[in-house]
Image (spheres, rainbow, N blue to C red):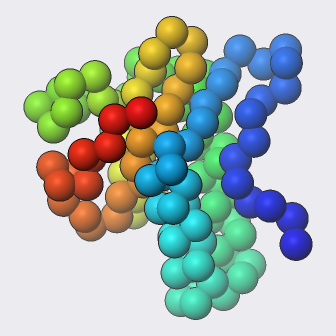
Amino acid sequence: MTSLKPLLPKKNDMSVYRLSEAADADFERLFEYGIETFGINQALNYVKGMQKHFENIAENPKHYQSVDYIRSGYRRSVYGKHSIYYLSETGKITIVRILNMENPDKALFYRP
């Protein structure tokens, strides 16, 4: 089976992102839930769309809402029913968490 984990962009692409360990676990969990609830095809479509959204975040990190009131330096973008929390630092994006209905105050304890 092909890996669904987001890959770093090609060398000539200016947008670079990575997933924190917590975000990687979130990504795996939402994919598994999608398979169980909606079937493999819909789950694949959703995670592939989310990966494309990660690329959009990396290309335009300032486009999305700052959430300093939750955690200093963090931004949030929404994809489907998930909030994607990330940091933009010196040309790289770190996706910190991918949350559904979790409380961000408790879930965003991670600092890369």
- Residue 70 figure quarter: top left
Asked if one can make out residue 78 in the rendered structure from this viewpoint, the answer is no
Q: Position of residue 93 (x, y in %)?
A: 52, 26
- Residue 82 figure quarter: bottom left
- Residue 103 figure quarter: bottom left
Asked if one can make out residue 75 in the rendered structure from this viewpoint, the answer is yes
> In the figure, 26 relative to 15: above or below?
below
Instruction: Name the residue: 77% across, 30% down.
Output: 9
Horizontal arrangement in the rendering, residue 58 relative to residue 42 (left or right): left
Instruction: Name the residue: 59% across, 79% down.
Output: 32
> In the figure, 65 relative to 34: above or below?
above
Instruction: Name the residue: 51% across, 71% down.
Output: 29
Counting labels gives 0
Instruction: Name the residue: 80% across, 61% down.
Output: 3
77 or 5, nearer to the observer: 5
Quarter of the image with the N terminus is bottom right
Horizontal arrangement in the rendering, residue 45 relative to residue 101 (left or right): right
> In the figure, 78 relative to 29: above or below?
above
Horizontal arrangement in the rendering, residue 38 relative to residue 40 (left or right): left
Q: Residue furthest top?
A: 90
45 or 100, nearer to the observer: 100
Quarter of the image with the C terminus is top left
Q: Position of residue 46 (x, y in %)?
A: 62, 64
Q: Position of residue 100 (x, y in %)?
A: 34, 64
